[in-house]
Image (spheres, rainbow, N blue to C red):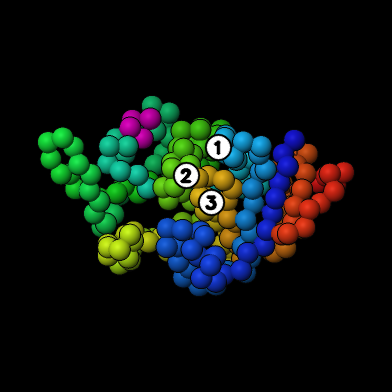
Amino acid sequence: MSEVWIQEEHLNSDFYEMVGHYVQLEGTIESVYFISETTEDVEDRDEQRDFLLDFLINQDRYPLYLTFLCDDMMAEDFEKEFNQLDIEYSCELLKEKQTYYTFFKRVTYHPRCFTLPIKDARTLSLVLEHTFYLANMNQFYSLSYSKNIRFKLKKVKEWGRWKNVSTPIFKTKEDTTFITIFHDGAGFFLFSNEDRYSSIQRVCSTFPEGSRVVQINDQEIGKDKEI
């Protein structure tokens, strides 16, 4: 049984800083929630991944589009894995440049952006099993019910230095719903303009059977309350 914490968020500078990756919205969004499966071991993210998987399977909505970023070496491994598993994907180079060093030289590369159209629960389970560790590593990782994301370079100051980073921009339409992952994979943010997610109560009604909400915003819920 999953014990769940849900919190309604407000779009302000503090929220965008918490979401990370300089996420931007092109349009308006009606509802945003932070959802986390409470665990005793904060270092164990398997339960968070499993709850996200159960949540998405319970929605029973496809296609679902996974988008994530990785470096060029990891991209080769993902392409090999996806081909072996017969998982459909597309991959493109972003304009951003990143650098790493070996013993012999300085290597510059463009991050890779993968997009996977997920059409059933089996593929969803496989994809999360093979890729969710990226979210635990704080790589950009998002799931959406529409192809509504693009990237552009944004000049930001990090650790006292200016750099160009790939900024995800979500185009929000009337039926938009998408998810981004919290720091270290410890929960996720649900963004939506759909009526089915227009209140905390409606979101909770879509949780997997047997889930128990233990906290709503700052209020703890009695342990005898089950949804």
Tell me the quarter of the picture where residue 81 sits. top left
**Residue sitting at the far top:** 84
| Local SS, label 2 | helix
Q: Position of residue 26 (x, y in %)?
A: 46, 70
Residue marked by disc 1 = 43
Label 2, label 3: how many angstroms apart (C-alpha)? Answer: 8 Å
Above/below status of 191 relative to 140: below
Image height of 120 relative to 158, above or below: above
Q: Secondary structure at mark 3?
A: loop
Q: Over which residues does the magenta segment extend?
A: 77-81
Residue ranking furthest to the left: 104
Question: Pointer 2: what residue?
Answer: 135
**Residue that carries the numbered disc 3 in the rendered image:** 182
Q: Is residue 117 visible?
A: no
- Residue 178: within the magenta? no
Q: 59 left or right of 70?
A: right
Q: Residue furthest front?
A: 160
What distance separates the C-alpha of mark 2 from that of mark 1? 13 Å
